[in-house]
Image (spheres, rainbow, N blue to C red):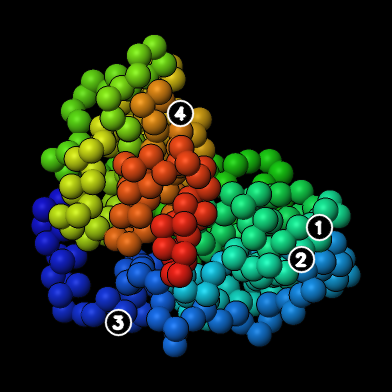
Amino acid sequence: MIIKRLLILWLLAAFSVAAYAQTIDPDFPVFDDQPLPSDGLVKYPDWFNQSFYDLPEDMQTALQAHKKGLIVYFGQQRCAYCKMLMDVNFTMPDIVEYTRRHFDITPIDIWGIDEVTDLQGKQLSEREYAIRENTNFTPSLIFYDAQGRIALRLRGYYPPYQFRAALEYVADDHYKKESFRDYLQLGDGASVFEAGDLNEEDFFQKPPYALDRSKRSAQRPLVVFFEQGDCHACDVLHSLPLQKPAIHQLFSQFDSVQLDRNANTPVLTPAGKATNARQWANDLDIFYTPTLVFFDEQGKEILRVDSVVHFFRLRNVLNYIVNKGYLVEPNYQLWRSSQQAAEPTP
């Protein structure tokens, strides 16, 4: 594992972050996730809906074109993760063709004030709609089927191979009979659910994992890293953001536990349930690795990060929890905007 980490660092030294993301492997996404400059704002593809934000009308248009349903995209102009979705995923011909064949996409600005009519006919602003749908990380996408029911939610940026799987999961009606987690695990190997060594950190607690907080409150918040071996995104997390002193210092204020989401490692959950890592991951519907699940001192889940995450977003999330921002503002994005109103961030 040390050799793997050194290799990643060597590669990153050889290529700039931007060049690495664009020219090495888009399924191994490394990019600068700071808010975009004013001359690099996110632009939608011209085939996105030019919508009046009447979602029933948008859905009817999609169905008349014999599509499977409607995707509502929640984003913001300065979001580096949104830019990755537009500049990487939505420039790949196969993804563009498949998406346009099966879905229409209506874009929503999470800070927007334009009025939206949702699929139940309720009228609210773009911002109110985004808050209601708990779009804590942008880009967020909600897939609505032909009946207006939610078939899948994606929170944050996912690399092309998982994004393709999400499109197929809904378009081919797999959501009607299995979870997205199960669908990914039944894939052809692209998701790499194989055994292997996990990356270690000195702030990870050792077993036994007695995480019960239901009877007595803990002294610190808890974060559980669900990972797996042979996981590129896990390697990036450990080789880049987790090596930053600022991130390391913030994690020192947590009880931190790492679990192999495919292992039978015994766990006593924060709610006091005796189980194992694999079953708990399934109960939590963990489909992406690494997923970081944050719990408060009483064992209640605060937030989870279950998509690509780099330094800027991770640092903000950790500050949100360490500073107990969630007690003042349960919505992470609103808390972030209150911290830096002039510069809303991803």
Residue matched to label 2:
115
Instruction: Return the residue nearer the eye: 31 or 341.
Output: 341
Up the image or down, 130 lies above or below 330; here it is below
Q: Are marks 2 and 3 in contact (CB under 8 Å)?
A: no
Q: Which image quadrant for residue 342? A: bottom left
| Other residues around mark 4 within 10 Å, as few (<14) / some (14–19) / many (≥20) | some
Q: Nearer the viewer, mark 3 or mark 4?
A: 4
What amino acid type is highlighted by mark number 2?
A: Glu
Residue matched to label 4:
300
Residue 32 locus on image (x, y percent) = 32, 72
Q: Give the CA separation, mark 3 to mark 1.
A: 43 Å
Whichever of callouts 3 and 4 sits on the residue coming sooner in the sequence is 3
What amino acid type is highlighted by mark number 3?
A: Ala
What amino acid type is highlighted by mark number 1?
A: Gln
The numbered dot on residue 123 is 1
Whichever of callouts 4 and 1 sits on the residue coming sooner in the sequence is 1
Q: Nearer the viewer, mark 3 or mark 1?
A: 1
Whichever of callouts 2 and 3 sits on the residue coming sooner in the sequence is 3
Q: Which image quadrant for residue 268? A: top left
Please indicate whether residue 114 sits to the left or right of residue 250 in the image. right
**Local SS, label 1:** strand
What amino acid type is highlighted by mark number 4?
A: Lys
**Local SS, label 3:** helix
The numbered dot on residue 256 is none
User: Which image quadrant: the C terminus?
Assistant: bottom left
Please indicate whether residue 15 sits to the left or right of residue 41 in the image. left
Q: Are marks 1 and 2 in contact (CB under 8 Å)?
A: yes
Instruction: Return the residue nearer the eye: 263 or 220.
Output: 220
